[in-house]
Amino acid sequence: MEVLYFAWVRERIGLPKETVDTQALTVMELVDELRAREERYALAFSDLSALRVAVDQDLADFDAPLKGAREVAFFPPMTGG
Amino acid sequence: MEVLYFAWVRERIGLPKETVDTQALTVMELVDELRAREERYALAFSDLSALRVAVDQDLADFDAPLKGAREVAFFPPMTGG
Amino acid sequence: MRIVVQKLPFDSGVELNAFTAKQSNMGAIVSFTGVVRDFPNGGLQYMDIEHYAGMTEKALEAIATDAMSRWDLGDVLVIHRYGMLTPQEPIMMVATASKHRKDAFEAADFLMDFLKSRAPFWKKEQTSASHEWVASKQDDEDALKRW
Amino acid sequence: MRIVVQKLPFDSGVELNAFTAKQSNMGAIVSFTGVVRDFPNGGLQYMDIEHYAGMTEKALEAIATDAMSRWDLGDVLVIHRYGMLTPQEPIMMVATASKHRKDAFEAADFLMDFLKSRAPFWKKEQTSASHEWVASKQDDEDALKRW
């Protein structure tokens, strides 16, 4: 699964994108796996209320299922316009 | 006093502007004087709810005083924009 | 603040750019352009706009000044034409500049509501057969109560 | 409907005129242009806008399609830049065309509210000393509840 990071999430984790081998069934399970990896992930995911997630380029909740998903992205609240 | 007419009021009365010699103390008294003149005036002023008035280029009511006024204009509701 | 009442056509894009270029640190620019609409089945030859020269400029200035006092605006532009216009020609335009989008939007909306019913313009629709004065709408009068 | 996501500058006036020229019998054209604001005391070197290529276009299209279904619109334009922008440069623009001014205004206002908080752009402010990601505002999130 492709995992993407944007804005300060990208900066904290230190890369824009990575391929993750995971059996996670939900976004939350994927977050827990990433958190367990390294300090920089734990730090990036320390406050989920400050994060948003998209599954296959659609905004989703943290309890969204990952079945069939090819791309998950994590980022702070958007500031367009 | 200069009296001006716009849009269909102008068309009904048949002129855009005239100088009127009047002692009218209010707009309503001026309207009554004009109505008494000729049929075309009576017709133009037959329904005051369809008319608006400006005294010295400011919107006013029909009971507005005319003391010191130099210019009175009658017209239908405005349709700008 | 710039108020223009003119017979000649104007270019909305050129006016928008000139207005934007004059602003200093305004993050939000809103414009409204009013365009002459034909009848649903066509047939409008031209729209003839009559106005009350002298009062028009005063009324537009009063409306724009009111907008400047109600919202946090950097600037206001109002352009309104009179005379004979053909379908698809711009009739008028307003633009507002503000630090904040909410102020820019609300002020432009306000300006339009007051231009519709409180600026001394009267529109006449001319076909090949006849002409008819455009009637004012109760909706437009009601819209003023929002402010 | 025209959705553009680009790094290059654009000209609001030229875009407004091109948009207006495409319309058929739309009496009301509203535009909003967002401009890079400097800090109150200056010092902004540039605003760096990151976006989620692929999702951005989808999200903008979804927002514009939603606007077209909620209001009686002839057309919608959305242009949004990414990359490095300096103060006074236009960031983005929306335009709406409708028969009626109310629809054109409301739809443009709606588009802006959703672009602010639902299109995947992130702004970073760069000074000579540091950079800081622009924080989202609770006001912007609350604004969505209006619709």
Image (spheres, coloured by chain):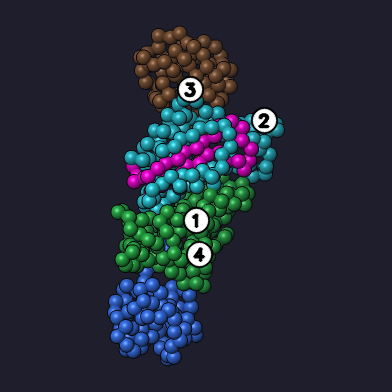
Chain colours: A blue, B brown, C cyan, D green
**Tag 4 and tag 3, C-beta contact below 8 Å:** no
- Quadrant where the C terminus of chain D is found in the figure: bottom left
Q: Which residues are magenta?
A: C70-98
- According to the picture, the residue beneath numbered tag 1 turns out to be D94
| Dominant secondary-structure state across the stretch colored magenta | strand
Using the image, tell me which numbered label, if any, was put on residue B74.
3
Which mark is drawn over residue B18? none
* Residue D31 vertical position relative to residue A22 in the rendered view, above or below: above
What amino acid is found at the position of numbered circle 4 in the picture?
A: Lys
**Disc 2 marks which amino acid?**
Ser
Q: Residues within 10 Å of mark 1 (few under 14, many from 20)?
A: many
Expressed as whole percent of the image width and height from the top left, the position of residue C81 reads 54, 34
Residue D61 placed where, x, y %? 53, 65
Front tag of 1 and 4: 4
Q: What amino acid is at disc 1?
A: Val
Which residue is at 51% across, 52% downward?
D12
Residue C50 visible: yes
Q: Residue at x 40, y 36 (%)?
A: C63
Mark 2 is surrounded, within 10 Å at the Cα level, by few (under 14), some (14 to 19) or many (20 or more) other residues, namely few
Q: CA distance from mark 2 to mark 3?
A: 24 Å
Q: Chain of mark 4?
A: D
**Is C81 inside the magenta-drawn segment?**
yes
